[in-house]
Amino acid sequence: MTHCPLSAAEIDAFIDIAFAEDIGTGDITAETVIPADATLSADINARQDMVVAGLFLMEPIFKRLDAACRITLDIKDGDYVQAGTRLAIITGPARALLSAERTALNILQHLSGIATMTKTYVDKIEGTKAKLLDTRKTTPGLRKLEKYAVAMGGGTNHRMGLYDAVMIKDNHIAVAGSVAKAVAGSKAAGRTDIQVECDTLDQVQEAVDAGANSLLLDNMPPATLIEALRIVQNRLPCEASGGVTLETIRAIAETGVDYISVGRLTQSAPAVDIGLDFHT
């Protein structure tokens, strides 16, 4: 997902929600303090090193309040920039720029924070075969945008939602009765994209024997991951998951797993520091 993740209608809907909660019935400060004919020019500047994501939203956000706003991008999403780099320049009616400022910065800082954290994880496993995956641990309503940010940071998108692929987890197994019964149910429905979450080596063997298409090895330390991979013998792609941190991911990758999923990419990434600096 390296293209614009939202359709024009989805972008409009996102801006509707963002402005409804921030501007509501009107920006009473701008409307009472700023002359209607005043204009401004501002730079969007990176105040720390970062991977940028979300610039494609700047134009529709500002133009929603006034079509006269003009946005010129100096870089593109996915670029790594150093502190002090200008990302874009914006000119237009002062009221519109001031009213849209917080919405624009909030989403740009949030998505760029995700992209920046993703890059640190990707860099940590460089040289191994493992690919970094995101998860469904996203902010409700922002999943496409947050997964886009992961891609901008060099990560790989996992399934978008429950409709994408079968992932049989511990609770599904508990209700179905066993790994084998759960896999059989999906196969009977014609599914060929069956991933099984395995907490133990016995479950790994059972999932392989049942005909799973891939495995999610959950909360296994590196030594156990190596044993699981010996059972699999390269017959299925294997993903490691569960409590992965920047300090542990390299050792996990060096076991030979194909994928490592990290929920904190979208769940816990801190916003980066980006400023909208007006020219005086």
Image (spheres, rainbow, N blue to C red):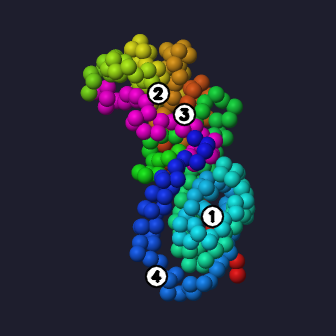
Residue designated by label 4? 28
Q: Quadrant of residue 191?
A: top left
Tag 1 and tag 3, C-beta contact below 8 Å: no
Answer few, some or many: residues within 10 Å of disc 2's Cα (few below 14, many 20 plus, some between 14 and 19): many
Give the magenta range.
148-174
Q: Quadrant of residue 168?
A: top left
Pinpoint residue 236: horizontal percent, then vertical percent. 51, 19
Left or right: residue 218 versus residue 57 is left
Say above or below: 1 vs 187: below
Say above or below: 159 vs 11: above
Tag 2 and tag 1, C-beta contact below 8 Å: no
Q: Amino acid at mark 4?
A: Ile
Q: Nearer the viewer, mark 1 or mark 3?
A: 1
Residue designated by label 2? 217
Query: Alpha carbon of mark 4 to alpha carbon of mark 2: how far?
Result: 54 Å
Tag 1 and tag 4, C-beta contact below 8 Å: no
Q: Secondary structure at mark 3?
A: strand
Pinpoint residue 142: horizontal percent, then vertical percent. 47, 51
Q: Amino acid at mark 1?
A: Ile
Q: Secondary structure at mark 2?
A: strand
**Tag count:** 4
Query: Alpha carbon of mark 2 to alpha carbon of mark 1: how far?
Result: 38 Å
Residue designated by label 1? 274
Left or right: residue 101 versus residue 27 is right
Answer few, some or many: residues within 10 Å of disc 4's Cα (few below 14, many 20 plus, some between 14 and 19): few
